[in-house]
Each structure stands twice: as C-alpha cells, then as structure tokens.
Amino acid sequence: MISYHFILQRSTCHRAFSTTVRSQSSLPFSVRGSRSAAGPDADSSADSSHPNGKMLRMIFFGKPGAGKGTLTARLVRKYDVISLSTGDLLRQHIAEKTEIGRIAEEIVAKGGLLPDELMLKMVSSKLDALRNNHWVLDGFPRTVGQGKLLDAHLRKQGTPLNLVVSLDVPDEAIIARISDRWVHLPSGRVYNLSYNRPRVDGLDDETGEPLTKRPDDNPEIFARRLRQFYTSTSPLLQYYSSLQTSRLHDPRAKLVSLRSSTSDEIWPLLEHNVRSVIPGLRERNEERRRTSLSEVVLAGEEERLASTKHTSRT
C-alpha cells in the first residue's frame, strides 16, 4: 500500500543500479481502456499501426530533488512522448469525485493507506489508453508489490516495460540546491535558479502565475525524505535488476543508472538511452504538440467525429 501524502509529492523514488553510466497534464476520465487487447505472449515491442513500429514504455526513478521532473519535461518537449503522473491522476480523481477518487478520499480522511490494487486500477486504465503512444510513468510503482502488479498487468496487455531509468544524483548535491527550487503548485512544474530558471523570475512559464516554495524544501526535512527514499526504493530496484536474469520476463526492459550532479549533464545520457531503445523516436514540431493524454483523446474524438460525418454523407 502507499500513503496518499507521499504520492502527492512530485518527487519519486530511486537508487542506483549496479551498472552506472557516468558523466503534465490534465487527464480526462472518459477513456475506458486500451484500443485493442493482446495476449501475454504477444510481441508488444512492435506496433505496426504506429509509424515508429515500437513504443517507449518507461518508468523513471529519482531521489527527491534529483531533477527527474526537469528531465521528463525536456523529454516531452523534444519528443513525441507523454508523461503520466500518478500524483496528477490521484488529485484529479479526488477533485472530480470519480469512483476511485471517492474511495481514495475516504481512506485519506481516516488516515489510511491506499491499497496497491487501487493504485494499479487508476494507473492501468490510463496506460491501456496509451497503448499506441510513447509514455513515461512518474510516481508508480513505489514498492516491490506495486512493481509486480504493474509488470503482470502490462505483460497481460502485451505492453511490457522496455526502459527503467534511475537517476543517481549525490545527496549532497541535492541538499545544496533545494534552496534554489521553486514550484508552480497547480501544475507541479518545477524550476531551479541554478540550472532551470523560469523565463521571468518568480513566474510560471506557461501560465504566468506566481511560483512558491515547498514547505519541505529545507535541508533537515530533505535529509529525512532521502532516508525514506532509500528504505522504500532499494528493494524495488533490486526487483527490476533481478528480472534481467529471469527467463520468465522476455523481452526484458533495459535498466540504466545515470549518475551526475546536474540535469544538464544527465540529459544527453538520458536521451542516448531512450534513443537506443526507440531509434525511430519522433521529435516534435510546431504542428504536432500533443503533450498530454487529454490532447491525444481529443484528437481521437475529432478524427472519429469527422469519420462519422463523412460516412453519413456517403
């Protein structure tokens, strides 16, 4: 199970794998599931309906303050990739009082923990809708149990993970730069005056609204969060590492650990590994900027309505 407070944090869990490389969006709930079903033996790494023939299915681990949000934003801006945040999903479910949201809100009100199965239901419904899109999952899984549930669901759908990335940023580097971090709370966009400044100091790039400081952005609290991170995430990363030697999980996801002190240094390493898994990954252009699931769904609805009108005329 997972705590509601912890998942609402934009940071995610991570620890380095043994092999080390050195140096957001509003989501609709009208989507009901995947466009097609595939059995567990399906070759999910290829998709003939997509120009690239292969979908990126990636999970991203990083300590609190490691820069994962910044790197994910770069990936989404440059490439045809959708970022799916479990924190955003949970907040929206609660705000829109969906079935999941009502259950979650009741559990939170009693100070309880959200069951892994509930988290999987929330996440899997969105991932199934993204079957023919490249995606990066942020905030899930956080435990070995959740990792196994996610793995089993994706394999059943014929859409297993193909990339697991861990950011290994030194603790001292993280603690040293948290004082420079500012956030746009409604969207979760994070800025840092050291390496990712907003275009206008104190204002969000997208909305122009004021940026704020997180109450837990201080060295003492951050040190506690880092200890919590190591405790909860080390077993999960060991789980993904163990799959590399298991014959039961084929094709296997590529596991990489990217170590450096800044996002600028890590970015080319991340880009290289993503492109090594999906060589034909398409870059965005000004005419094609569907950066969120909502935009993908709206585009699909527009195409469906257009097709319906055309059929009725003929």
Image: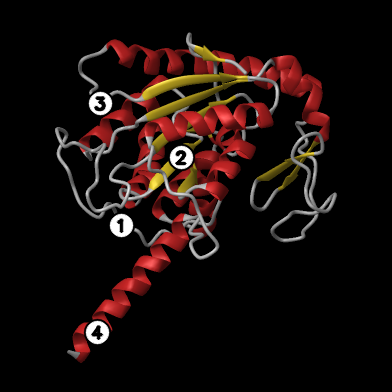
Quadrant location of the N terminus in the rendered image: top left
Where is mark 1, residue-wise?
32
Label 2 or label 1, whichever lies nearer to me, is 2
Q: Viewer-proximal residue, 297 or 261?
A: 261
Q: Viewer-proximal residue, 8 or 189?
A: 189
Where is mark 3, residue-wise?
251
Secondary structure category for the residue under label 3:
loop
Distance in Å between CA atoms under marks 4 and 3: 41 Å
Disc on the earlier residue, 2 or 1: 1
Q: Total marks drawn? A: 4
Q: Are marks 2 and 1 in contact (CB under 8 Å)?
A: no
Disc on the earlier residue, 2 or 3: 2
Distance in Å between CA atoms under marks 2 and 3: 18 Å
Disc on the earlier residue, 4 or 2: 2
Compared to residue 221, the image places residue 234 above or below, namely above
Q: Residue furthest bottom?
A: 313
- Residue 218: in sight, yes or no? no
Secondary structure category for the residue under label 1:
loop
Label 3 or label 1, whichever lies nearer to me, is 3
Say few, some or many: other residues with alpha carbon within 10 Å of mark 1 (under 14 / 14 to 19 / 20 or more): few
Q: Are marks 2 and 3 in contact (CB under 8 Å)?
A: no
Quadrant location of the C terminus in the rendered image: bottom left
Secondary structure category for the residue under label 2:
strand
